[in-house]
Image (cartoon, rainbow, N blue to C red):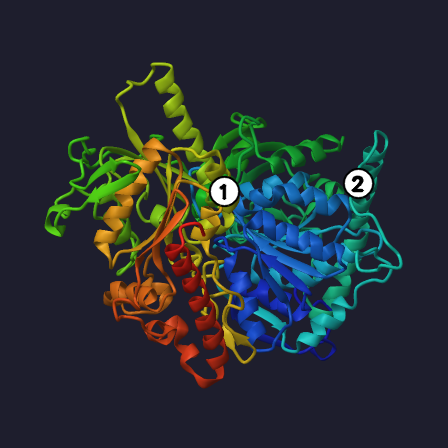
Amino acid sequence: MSGNMAITEKELKVQKHTFKSGNEMAALAASQINFHVMGFYPITPSTEIAEYIDEMKVEGENTVHMIAGDGEHGAAGICYGASVAGARVFNATSANGYLYALEQMPVQSGTRMPMVLDLVTRAVSGPLDIRGDHSDLYFALNTGWIILYGNNPQQVYDLHPVAVRVGEHPDVRLPVIVGFDGFFTSHQKRRVQYFEDAQVLRDWVGPQPEGFPHALDPRHPKTFGPYMNDPDLINNKYQLHLAMQNVLKVLPDLFEDYSKLSGRKYDLIEEYMMEDAEVALFLLGSAYDTGKEAVDKLRARGIKAGVLCLHLIRPFPVERIQQALRNVKALVIGERSDSYGGNGGNMSHEIKAALKDDPANQTLIATRVYGLGGKDFYPDDADTFFNLALEMQSKGTVEVPFDYFGLTAATENQPVEVVAPLTKAEQTSPVKVELVGEELKVTVPPPRQMMGMPKRIVPGHGACPGCGIFGALDNFFRALSGDVVVLFHTGCAMVVTTGYPYSAHRVTYIHNLFQNGAATLSGVVDTFYEKKRRGEIEIGEDITFVMVTGDGGMDIGMGPSIGAALRNHKMIILEYDNEGYMNTGSQLSYSTPLGHKTATSNVGTLGKGKTFHHKDTPQIMAATHIPYVFTAVESNPQDVWKKAAKAQWYAQNVGLVYGKMLIACPLNWLSEERLGTKIVQAAVDCNFFPLYEIERGITKLTYDPEAKGKKVPVEEWLKMMGKTKHMMKPQFADVVAEFQKEVDRRFRRIKAMSEHPDL
């Protein structure tokens, strides 16, 4: 990117100078383009983009219709459907979220449906790491999408309108990824310019080209995605190949046209001091600027050094790479990802292949994998890369073509054991469960005796002050006897208890991602019983298997949970309900109640918080006819202990159990830390969160606020939290009334079922 070239300031549209992050600039560009639809799902570090767009929307700055998916796979389906319907479509995701959506990517490109997807690059787990590298980006290379890449927030903004134009070009018609580095670019603020008047960008993008087939034309019906016979698919893919080749023709002209609007010139690749460079680095993304610093120091010493990166990754700009490197004697390729077992990452193999096809090229090449998991890349590191290139140039050979750079020490696969594991005797609960006839009788001792149980999760985790998760989990686990194996979905409870190399768990702990925890634990459970059947585990050995989910895990993980329930595995699914995706910054989940403010259901001139009612997960799980379903809150500990003991008995003897515990989240509920127990009790007393159990299909209300003289209106609960303070204003009276009506309806239904066992 260069300066204003020969264009005068008077010829350029008015632009504002400020400091913004990459995510802010991505959201600003998307808002100014004013896409029809954004199907989205929160994942760090891309989540902020949807938040910023929603903040601008409720103030009337855009009319983007935002649809919260049940997961990234669902969000990708929403986007595809909107594209087929003829919408301009936008989305943003990262890492495992992108991989979860990956199946949909070739569908979008294979049917030639344009859209724009921000890929805010992040390490792909496992193990889980939320910081930035390029491992997700490399999965995108073979999906048939155009891939543009920005090094800094300014480029992120500028690439969005170009992405729309190139993807919608009649000779292209392909979806486009705009990639940029997670945290390095997405969250760091840099000096930027953007058009003050959104109409400038909107006019440059222009209307959608006419003539694209779409699904909303009944007089001209179309078939999208037909079954392909033997000779047809290769023809389809050849057409996609030709469309990619057309990008190489179309994109330079679009870059030139955009430069006349903005004064910022782009090319397929970006070069710094490459005109006469003899040693060079290839660095993709934010590390490119670090490489430029190293070049300046070497040039001051008279060394002909340069650095280059790509703005276009797909299609790969072979000719431009060949031109840039034709006279370079030694090149070090830095890769923020590895193609494991391939002796180099994808960029290394593609650059080498490009140069191999150039008979005039004699460049020596070495690859170094660096910066995995967001490890910083400093100027001294770039110096080290250049020293390697200079050594290669001097010796005329490459002694180590491929290696990792920046290792500090060899690490073990498992965290170190810093607390003693619990014995079976230490895990024996004083709660007694006895089957009398067909009824379970539970005897709970005095609370003082219950408090003597050792904790299965030790103090020292990193949860926020006042977090209700661990009080709830601790209460639940106190009523379980014997050995326990736990699986935690990704979420707050997972993140704050397992910071490598330490773990707060004194029992066996497994992690898998939101969407697949129930399936994973199903495999663990049935392996245990199969090994028992084969005599590989002692017959008398018993383990209780518990999956802990929350932070929206029963949205994205609903399908596998229902699958596990229908198969009736002997396990417990325990959901802590904090009413949002709190581990990614308080975005709306389906469990968020009507009207509540979150980072993606903002309140403003045109926004009244979440627009649809909360998800009734216990009733959904009860519909699978599992043996036991319950709800509980920490403020009723004896009720928790009774239900936990029942849950264990059913999980060991009959089949799958589901339980839901409402927990306080002071940070994102904007409530006082000390009031958590009172807030969840108020949720019970206003009937928002009824306490009941469904045992072998029979519903029993275990707490009736009205019968106890404690019934309060929902306002009594809402006024205790900052996230709902807007609902106390007169203009939200209709929202509160609708919310109260639905809460009362659901409670009456539970009460009726409790009074009539056949319901």
Which of the two marks, 2 or 1, is nearer to us in this view?
A: 1
Q: Is residue 673 visible?
A: yes
Q: Residue at x 68, y 65 (%)?
A: 35
Residue shown at 41% from the left, 24% from the top: 527
Q: Residues within 10 Å of mark 2 (few under 14, many from 20)?
A: some
Please tell me which of labels 2 and 1 falls first in the chain: 2
The residue singled out by tag 2 in the image is: 241
In the rendered structure, the answer to whether residue 497 lies left or right of residue 431 reads right
**In this view, 289 is above or below 547:** below
User: Residue pushed farthest right?
Assistant: 219
**Residue type for callout 1:** Ile
- Please give the label number shown on residue 562: 1
Return the residue found at the far bottom: 730
Which is more toward the observer, 111 or 179?
111
Q: Is residue 64 above or below residue 113?
A: below
Q: Position of residue 493 (x, y in %)?
A: 34, 49
Residue 694 picture location, percent across and down? 38, 48
Secondary structure state at the residue bearing disc 1: helix
Instruction: Out of 130 and 559, give the one closest to the viewer.
Output: 559
Q: Quadrant of residue 696?
A: top left
Q: Please tell me which residue lies in front, 243 or 737.
A: 737
| Residue at position x 42%, y 68% in the image | 744
User: Residue 353: percent from the left, percent from the top?
Assistant: 69, 32
The front one of 738 and 455 is: 738
Mark count: 2
Measure how far apart labels 2 and 1 are at the Cα level.
Answer: 41 Å
Location of residue 669 in the rendering, given as x and y in whole percent from the top left corner: 36, 66
721 left or right, relative to 564: left
